[in-house]
Image: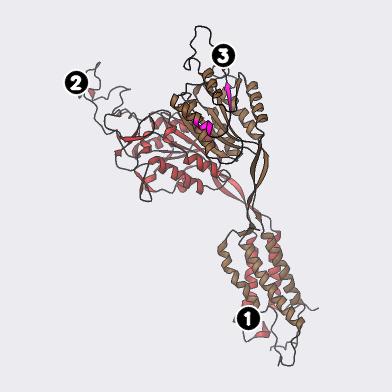
Chain colours: A brown, B red
Amino acid sequence: MNLAVSSPALLLLLPLALLPLFRSAQRPQSASSLDGIESDPLSVAIDWTLRIAGAVAITALILGIAGLHRLGRTIEKTGEGAHIVLLIDRSSSMDNTFAGRAPEGGEESKSAAARRLLKDFIAHRDHDLVGVAAFSTSPMHVLPMTEHKAAAMAAIDAIDRPGLAFTNVGRGLALSLDMQEADTSPASRVIVLVSDGAAVIDRKVQETLRAAFARRPINLYWLFLRTAGTPGISTVPAPGEDDTPQAMPERHLDKFFKSLNISYRAFEAENPEAVSGAIAEIGKLERSPITYFERIPLEDMKAHAFAVAIAALIVLLAAKLAEVRLVPVAEGA
Amino acid sequence: MRLPLDDARFWALLAALLLTCLAMALPRVTLTRNVYDLVAIVDVTGSMNTRDMTDAGQPESRLDASKAALERLLAQLPCQSRLGLGIFTERRSFLLFNPVEVCDNFAPIETAIQNLDWRMAWEGDSMVTKGVYHAMTIAEDLKADLLFLTDGHEAPPEPRGVPLPEFEGTLGKVKGVVIGVGGKDKVPMPKYDDDGNEIGSYGPMDVPQENHSGPPPPDAHLRPGYHPKWAPFGSDAPQGDEHLSSVRSEHLAAIGAKTGLAHVDLIDNPNLLETIAGNARSRPVEVAVDVRPVPAALALALLVALYAAPAFLRGTPSKL
């Protein structure tokens, strides 16, 4: 039952409930002698009923005043969803539109589009755990994996503020992997990388990432917000052009992800509609069974306690009304 | 049946019953309570690694002390208050998440505070004044009040003898507190290599001792080797103790005065919630309060008196 009270100190009053066991609420009446009256079972039963009713009334009132409630608990349920880390690029280029210029008039920047669409995505995912990480020159832990949608929304809300300097994808990924590592449940794990560019990943960091991705299955989605006129993931260098990570970071980051032998998909979006399509696709793909916890809030039981007290008080009052005087009270006695 | 109208016990019982019925029937009463919308910006620059705060006798870095203070505050803030979090380095503040309700989201906010790290910093500079001014615009946009936790250590140092830049926002639009973190004595700051390992502390030559980005101070021509074009700051290496750091209370108080924020130093153990209550805008919210225990307590008192009274009135049993 998991009952508890809000102010346990009040339970110190509980010994008061013993009072009715020794004292009666009935009017004491004088009788010359009880010797002539035999004790009969019915009287004994009534006597004890009244004593216990008194004790129950006092106990119930104390419990009610102390704030009796049934504890909130979590119950395990199974649904569809995943544990998702959103890894968001906060470099300053995200402040521009898909056309690569500062937004003006009704235009939407890449970060504002990402914010709107990611919030929409989270709102429709009922059982996911969502964590948020950001990266620019350095990786930033924003929000741990949480089932609290309001917190995740607040973190996504902050992504369309002016961004910082560079795009250090490698360290950002390492941080997201750490966040996934901390979570030990068997749920499907997802990293959604949202960026509008790529960068060379340091050899050392590459090895760390390769080892971390090998440790446990992780589904990686790269939502690449491509600016018009810039090289994309699948752009093949023209003959004579350099095919190096420095010259074509997007193509090489994609190659690196493919070489990891993990479940990986890249979505190249050149406008908000394409982003929305890609997000919907991720939503469709991530429908593995997941255990999640539903909180059952604590249930107030004060009313129950008061109801019990009322019942006991009615018994006592009935006894009171059934009282008869053995001898009439003399005037002025 | 004759009602025992002359029996006080009857009246006590009846009253107890009615009071308990009243307790059952009473609706919740709504009271108003003051809550706060805050955004806390924490300085994560190098000087915040200085271990001149203490936690239970153990030395603690300024950053850890700031995080501990925020965690304590998070636990104290009344429910329905909202707290957002951000970091400061270079010359601007960076918002991690918008203000969000503190009770429902306690666990993620707490973990986010614990995960603040100096490695989040994207640049080595620490222009505190500009950082506070920038944080003010963020707070204004979020319609929240500002808590800015910093040691006030400017790197590069502010030009000597030049007043603080003017604050361009409207005074009073954002309220809040600048919270100074750090000891009052100047101590060395730890230094880290590229991989984040601590490698001793900063020496006098490791940091700029003087800001050479503006015009030289008016007395520069008195310095040895002065030349108006080739050596406007003199030819000697600048002397100074910018490699040592303490909480710059006067500087922070001056920033506070410019921006209309209050200033306290964490080392003085201020009660942050009270400071916020005095210096932030409160938002009244309605809270449902359960008043049912009040009549129930009266009923209990009557009932106990009913049973306990004969002990004091023994001897006149039939006259009650």
Mark found first going from the N terminus, 2 or 1: 2
Residue pictured at 37% horizontal, 41% vertical: B61
Q: Is residue A297 above or below residue A192?
A: below
Quick one: quadrant of the N terminus of chain A?
Answer: bottom right
Give the mark toward the camera: 3 or 2.
3
Is label 3 on the same chain as label 2?
A: no
Q: Which residue is mark 3?
A: A235
Q: Which residue is mark 1?
A: B310
Classify mark 1: helix, strand or loop.
helix
In the rendered structure, which segment of residues is drawn in magenta?
A211-233
Residue pictured at 54% horizontal, 14% vertical: A231
Q: Which mark is residue B225?
A: 2
Quarter occupied by residue A145: top right
Query: Is there CB contact under 8 Å for labels 2 and 1?
Result: no
The disc numbered 1 marks a residue on which chain?
Answer: B
Question: How far apart in space, not on screen, are marks 3 and 2 (Cα)?
Answer: 59 Å
